[in-house]
Image (cartoon, rainbow, N blue to C red):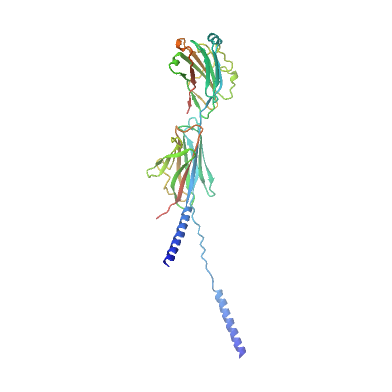
Amino acid sequence: MNINKFSAIFMTLAIVLSIAGYTYAHWTDIIRINGTIKMAHILIDIKSEKVLMSRTVKKYYNSSVCYEVSPDLHTLEIYSKNLGPCWYIWVGLVMQNQGTLSGKIKTPVYSFEPSDGWGDHFETKEYFYGPYPENTGFGTLEVWGKVEIDKQLKKDGTVTFTTPSTPTPFTLNPTEKAVIWIWIHCKADLPPSAQGQIITLYVNIVDDVDI
Amino acid sequence: MKEKFLALLTCIFIALSTTGFIYAQWNDIITVSNTMEFGHLTLRFVYPLTCWDIDDATKDVGKLNCDYTDPDPIEGYETLVVTATNAYPGYEAHCDFTLKNIGALTEHITEVIIIPGTGLEVGETYFDTNNNPIGWRLDNAVTHQPVLYVYVYKDTDLSLICISLDSGETLQGKMTVQVTDNAEECQTYSFTVEMNYEQVTYP
């Protein structure tokens, strides 16, 4: 008898509690905020390149140069042989901002490998032109299309373009292009120990987010 | 004698049936019809809704879009969707939204939780003076470096939790998202903030 009463009370409580829980669940609800942040990126690619060596340098130094752009379009690798005092080349690049953010183009940073003082024996000058809209015809552009070494690009590191160069830093907006000409020159005081050395010069066109 | 008895029986029968009929005619039923409609508990996003980011006045690099989705058949929306594109380290997105009690019962938000999207985890939670959460630091789940700071609040220092809203009453809420220097290029970061609410029960 007692067991039957206990069972009845227990069952009643269970039913009441489950109904109460069900009811409570119906009287609460949720609203939501969905947030999505899609990040931008900065990406300046090399779209075109020129490495110009004068006939005089080729002949006098028996020097040669070959070059290629890395598959990621970020690096121009130049291999030069038979450098000597007063040797020089001109390196030109057309860069394009392929990212979604404006980039700030700064003065290039040069580094050498091995790094033990070789930078002291080189001198460089750089000239920036632009920015130009994406659809600019570079074939007819004064600073790119028909540029010749020892004509517009002088052996002393000066240029004779009528187009004024753009002072750094400058902003390169998405899709815009810019031209850079770099004069790389071996100083006359190159030590005898340089003979037979193989060195690598890295030119980093420093870009930064321009916000 | 036999006829007399039959006549008397017939009379009694007729009298009784007439009485019953009259009795039936003077009885009736009254009905109390009580239609009870339970109150509903509904909190929804309503307009005005405004969003802006920190570079609007200068270069407007980042683009911020916010809108409501999942419309309620009565009024308002169930979900606020905030999407920032072309974000960068230091980018800040702000959103001012409005909540409205479109139900009949007084209600309040009881819990605000954040659910990080893929690749993120909750690194730290920030609380107001009442010990209610108002902000979260979302970290990169692999490097454990902070990526986003997300804040949902009523005022600068106060949570949306435990603010009673009577029927028809509105509440202004704010959300701020800050992108840290550890955010990676070309990545998409997402999160969901859930606000649980319930009826306010009076003692």
Residue furthest front in the image: A196
Please identify the quadrant where the N terminus of chain A is shown. Answer: bottom left
Seen from this angle, which residue lies furthest left? B129
Q: Is residue B60 above or below residue A69?
A: below
Residue at screen point 53% across, 43% down: B69
Looking at the picture, tell me which residue is in the foreground, A192 or B139: A192
Q: Position of residue B116 (x, y in %)?
A: 47, 40
Residue A192 in view of the camera: yes
Position of residue A73 measured from the top left corner of the image (x, y, whole percent): 54, 24
Instruction: Tell me if A49 is positioned left or right of A20 in this view.
Output: right
Looking at the picture, tell me which residue is in the foreground, A151 or B172. Answer: A151
Count how many numbered circles sit on residues in the image: 0
Residue B104 seen by the camera: no
Looking at the picture, how far across and down is residue A180, in whole percent?
A: 52, 19
List x then y, in percent, for residue B19: 56, 79
Q: Residue furthest right?
A: B3
Who is closer to the viewer here, B133 or B46? Answer: B133
